[in-house]
Image: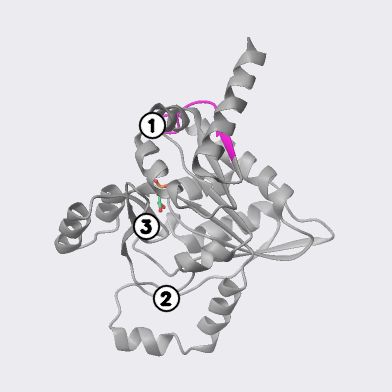
Amino acid sequence: SVMNQLLGMHQVEKEISQYFGIKRCIVVAGNSDNQEKVLYEFGDILTDSLDLILPEGENIIAVMGGTTMAMTAEHMGSLETEKRHNLFVPARGGIGEAMTVQANSVSAVMASKTGGHHRALYVPEQLSLETYNSLLQEPSIQEVLTLIEQSNCVVHSIGRALHMAARRKMSDDEMVMLKQNNAVAESFGYFFDEEGEVVYKIPRIGLQLKDVQKIPNVVAIAGGKTKAKAIRAYMKNAPKQTWLITDEAAANEILKGV
Ligand code: G3H
């Protein structure tokens, strides 16, 4: 029955949040590997989750990029109230994604769908260290970096390590290094092995992993059977305040190994 299915899903959510020691897990029916509607539902659930966790006042929400984040953003709804205002910023500088799935684009879409505001971080990717360092002195860039530092919420996805490295056109040397270190997951420019240990980090400005630990509201969104291994690896050491929004296909695969 539908009731049994719902109870089953709640049980799975509880098992997953307990297994990872995280605050909450929400599981959407289906498999986002081949069902777009699951990604749309992530948008609804992210909206509802943020509506619950974001306090009144001025919130700064740092967001990452990727296709999951981009699709989720498109399906968000209003989050603005008389007492609560939200500013979306990209969590980190560009890490080699196509324009439409970059954190800058995702934060702009989330702001427009939720009725909030956004600020972009314009830092080109292929720069000499010298140019990069002088760019960081620019007041307009400093201003956005300060906002990122002040964020009280972060929303990000999780990807498969080698898949993400290839998509971001990382060098052959980097690919070899990732393989040698058994990297299986990637999130906000960090690569993780199966135990959830960081094995590599793309050197970019913005939020660092240690900052995320201290942010009170953290939401990770990732689904699909193909991502189960990556999700499990990343979630092992994820900040305890994390809410994981995932799907049935990933959840069942994650629990298989438990
Ligand atoms: O960091 C993880 C990636 O942003 C995930 O990308 O949503 O396109 O799989 P994806």
Cα–Cα gap, marks 1 and 3? 24 Å
Residue 116: where, in percent of width, then height? 69, 60
Left or right? Give the position of 151 relative to 101: right
Q: Are marks 1 and 2 in contact (CB under 8 Å)?
A: no
Magenta segment:
25-35
**Label 3 sits on residue:** 98
Tell us which disc is closer to us: 1 or 3: 1
- For marks 3 and 2, the one nearer the N-term is 3
Type of amino acid at the residue the image marks with label 3? Ala
Q: Judge by depth and name the residue closer to the eye, 32 or 181.
A: 181
Judging by the rendered image, the residue that carries numbered circle 2 is 123
- Label 1, label 2: how many angstroms apart (C-alpha)? 34 Å
Residue 37, percent from left and from top: 52, 31
Query: What residue would you read off at disc 1?
Result: 225
Label 3 – label 2 distance at C-alpha: 14 Å
Q: Position of residue 61 (x, y in %)?
A: 61, 62
Residue furthest out toward the top: 1
- Residue at image position (24%, 53%) is 166
Give neighbour class at mark 3: few <14, some 14-19, many 20+ (Cα, 10 Å): some
